[in-house]
Amino acid sequence: MAKKENAFAGYDITTQAVHTGTDYDEGTGAVRRPLHMANSYKLPDDLSQVNYSSTDLLMYARNGNPNQHWLEEKVAALHGAEDAIVLGSGVAALHALFWTLLESGDRVVYPNVSYMAVYRMFHELFNRKFGVETVMVDMTDLEAVKKAITPGTKLVHIETPDNPTVGVTDIAAIAEIAHANGAILSVDNTFASPLNQRPLDLGADFVVEALTKFINGHGDAQGGAILSNDLETMDRIRYEAQVNVGSVISPFNAWQIFRGSVTFPLRMQRINETSLTVAKWLEQREHVTFVAYPGLESNPGYEVAKKQMQNGFGGVISFGLDTDDKTVERFCAQLKVITFAVSLGHDESLIFPQPSYDERIHLYPEKFRKGFLRFSLGLEDPKDIIDDLDQALKAVGL
Ligand SMILES: *Cc1c(COP(=O)(O)O)cnc(C)c1O
């Protein structure tokens, strides 16, 4: 697909978030992009040149629609990437990338802590269905990574900070090991967001963002993006995974996320600050057994995070309470400002317990196996968030 020049390249990310991908509407002169819900588009009179599996021509919604394309321009700008593909969810973007890159017999190295669907794809699905060799490794342990990434490894996939333990992986170091062995590196950047971390600048070949989270930021639309400077492979992803497998985004969701993304850098700045404040408060609160946040000096990933996260440390904290699963649930139910729900990166703070009976708990460091919560900070006043945590802790006797 022909890429549109980013006329705002070189401007600050806040300016690009406002201006890239937007323009006057040609038909009406409206200063907002319209929403095009059409499934099909008028065909050219001469059909001999039409390729029905391509995304070059607006023809059918699965081959692409204007709202998807405008959002692609915006998300590419946020990452300083040459190309972006926006699909129907973060998982659709991850799957599209893996599906396109991998063949039977290929070897993949993936992290012991990752988004649940990545674990499912590599622990269960790609190996069983397609004979892909999948090797799990602790990505924070570079010696173990060096052993796992053998020559001929096709893909190394990492996530940093990771979901749900908020562990930090050294992107540049892993890129070096991967490339020395001829492997491709993909990075799930959802927890960091492009304000804080741009893996393509650190040597990654592909980046995935769940747009559902901080970039949309309002908890009302699902979408995902793949970012890369490898234009040839990106076109293969369009052909093999978008048009012919079909994980497209609805134009309405693309329109919603486009709108949310305009304020993304400002929201993220605020969320970075609130998260650090709340993490520091949690760290000194009685009955809190640990706080995992890359911005805390006590965090084992702090030095790496400082090196690769330029504007802040993101909006997710994980922490432990010195109590059992039942009391953790009662604590969540007592919260008034913070919402007891899955997901992250919304305008409201969200909290979600990771119970001791979770199937993957044995993969996490020891301290995460009791009273563990994943906490996504929102846009509320930091003091109101802290007071809410404190009153709910007291309400359950902690
Ligand atoms: C939420 C999330 C995803 C998946 O995004 P969806 O839009 O829910 O499919 C992928 N990776 C990470 C790290 C996430 O937090």
Image (cartoon, helix red, strand yellow):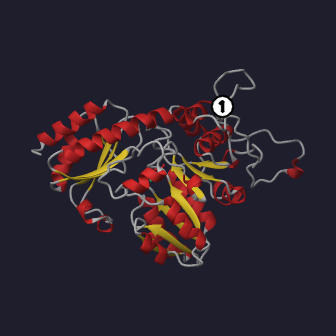
Element class at badge 1: loop
Q: From where the camera sits, is residue 351 visible?
A: yes
Q: Residue 17, position in %: x, y? A: 58, 34
Q: Is residue 125 above or below residue 294?
A: below
Front residue of 360 and 316: 316
Drawn side of residue 46 relative to residue 74, left or right: right
Which residue lies at the image location 43% right of the left edge and 43% below the top edge? 312
Does residue 351 appear to the left or right of 174 in the view shown?
left
Question: x, y (%) of residue 332?
Answer: 23, 44
Residue at point 48%, 52% (across, down): 308
Residue found at the very far left of the displayed protein: 397
Q: Residue at x 42, y 71 (%)?
A: 137
Label 1: few (<14), some or many (≥20) within 10 Å? some
Residue 162 seen from this side: no
Q: Is residue 105 left or right of residue 388?
A: right
- The spot of residue 328 in percent (x, y) is 19, 50
Residue at numbered disc 1: 22
Which is more toward the observer, 143 or 139?
143
Residue at position x 47%, y 78% from top? 147
In the displayed structure, 289 sits above or below 136; it is above
**How many discs mark residues in the rendered view?**
1
Name the foreground residue: 211 vs 326. Answer: 211
Q: Nearer the viewer, residue 278 or 239?
A: 278
Q: x, y percentage for residue 77?
A: 62, 41
Q: Is mark 1 within 8 Å of ligand 1?
A: no
Q: Quadrant of residue 392?
A: top left
Name the amino acid type tagged 1: Thr
